[in-house]
Image (cartoon, grey):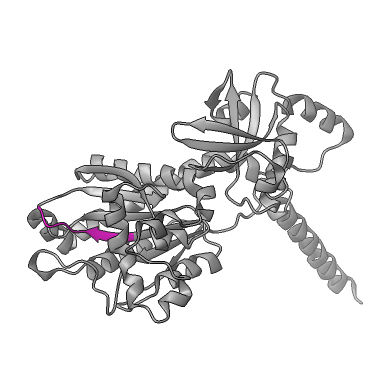
Amino acid sequence: MNSQLFCKFKLTTKSIVFFVFLTVFLFGENTLFAQKKEFVVVLDAGHGGKDPGKVGYKKVKEKDIALKIVLQVGKLLSKRKGIKVIYTRKTDVFVDLWERGKIANRADADLFVSIHCNAHNSQASGAETWVLGTHANQRNFEVAKAENAVILMEDNYKTNYKGFDPNSPESVIGLTLIQEEYLDKSIQLASIIQTEFTNKLKRKDRGVKQAGFVVLYQTYMPSILIETGFITNYKEGVFLGSKSGQSKFSETIYSGVSKYIDQLELNTIAVEHKITPKTAESEKKSNIVANYSNVAFKVQIASGSRKLETKSYNFKGLKNVDRVKVGRSYKYYLGNTSDYSRIKELHSLAKSKGYKSAFIVAFKNGEKISIDEVLKKS
């Protein structure tokens, strides 16, 4: 090997070593720059194909409006870095309710958003957003009944839904609320979107409500169902049937979902960060900082309307679970410590047990405070 060739070889080797070092430094699993999993949003356009949904003013069909809005929302979300969008349908086809939920579950989605239009025999108007619930309120049951009735069009629906009767209040109330684990976040998203409808789009606020929607019951992630407006209302029907109206609804829903994701990142960013390996001395200093004597950290693992005994068999073997009543619902927390390192361990434990939506919360003097602020002050 001549000297010129040797120099080139040395240069190449050094370049490779430097490149590998740089790659490990920037993208290694122990850095703050570790790549996070994509945030998967499943968008569900209600009805479709042989099921037109509701038919409103000037014969406008719910299935068409829902699809147009969904496709526009998906287009906007896809432009945002780190978000993957999946559709239950992208064309005018009929999709079973159980299949819609399976699409989201197979994708291990982080969010499920189902978009619909409302109807009434009066000139009722306004937007409302729904989460899963078992409330026996007659009005809520009628809304759920109308949306659930589509299962009667499905092949073998009695087998797929194990005898579920969409016309029976007992069937709706009797749904097993596996989805309740995600109720808190579902309400959070629904509230954000409902506020956007009221403030940005100037829609009449019909509120955030709960009912037994089968399409929400089928999913294992935070899930909401949006009733954009009443297509049977003269003004609202024309607005929803127009390109301008559909565009405005799409932008507003996109804005709401984006705000929800931003809030989620603020609550979990400290958990997602990985810590670089420390020397014994730096570890000692870190443990001092990690202990916040006046702050109590907990892991919220579930919330819902059911009052459960805080026994380990109710929480997949997890012990030391606390139940706190908030309004008419209950929140369930794992752990209670001022050691931030310890709470991160419990957070990982909760996720390993299947509580994928678990997140860390902080309290000071019994009041919930921002984790982000706590860590900034340290």
- Does residue 193 appear in the picture of this structure? yes
Q: Residue at x 86, y 36 (%)?
A: 279
Name the residue located 65 percent from the left edge and 54 percent from the top edge: 354
The residue depicted at 15 percent of the width and 63 percent of the height is 241
The image quadrant of residue 146 is: bottom left
Q: Position of residue 257 (x, y in %)?
A: 40, 50
Question: Left or right: where does residue 73 sit relative to residue 271?
Answer: left
* Image position, residue 184 (x, y; %): 48, 43
Q: Residue furthest right?
A: 1
Residue 224 located left or right of residue 198: right
The residue that appears at 53% across and 27% down in the rendered structure is 368
Task: Say left or right for 331 vs 246.
Answer: right
Residue furthest out toward the bottom: 155
Most foreground residue, 85 or 376: 85
Residue 105 on the magenta span: no
- The quarter of the picture where the C terminus appears is top right
Q: Which residues are magenta?
A: 115-122
**Nearer the observer, 147 or 26:** 147
Residue 261 image position (x, y, % from top left): 47, 47
Q: Quadrant of residue 212?
A: bottom left
208 over 20 or under it: above or below: above
The N terminus - image quarter: bottom right
Q: Nearer the viewer, residue 33 or 84?
A: 84
Rendered location of residue 172, percent (x, y): 39, 57
Horizontal side of 351 relative to 263 (left or right) equals right
Camera sees residue 79: no
How many marks on residues? 0
Where residue 92 sits, quadrant-wise, is bottom left
Task: Give yes or no for residue 118 being in the magenta stretch.
Answer: yes
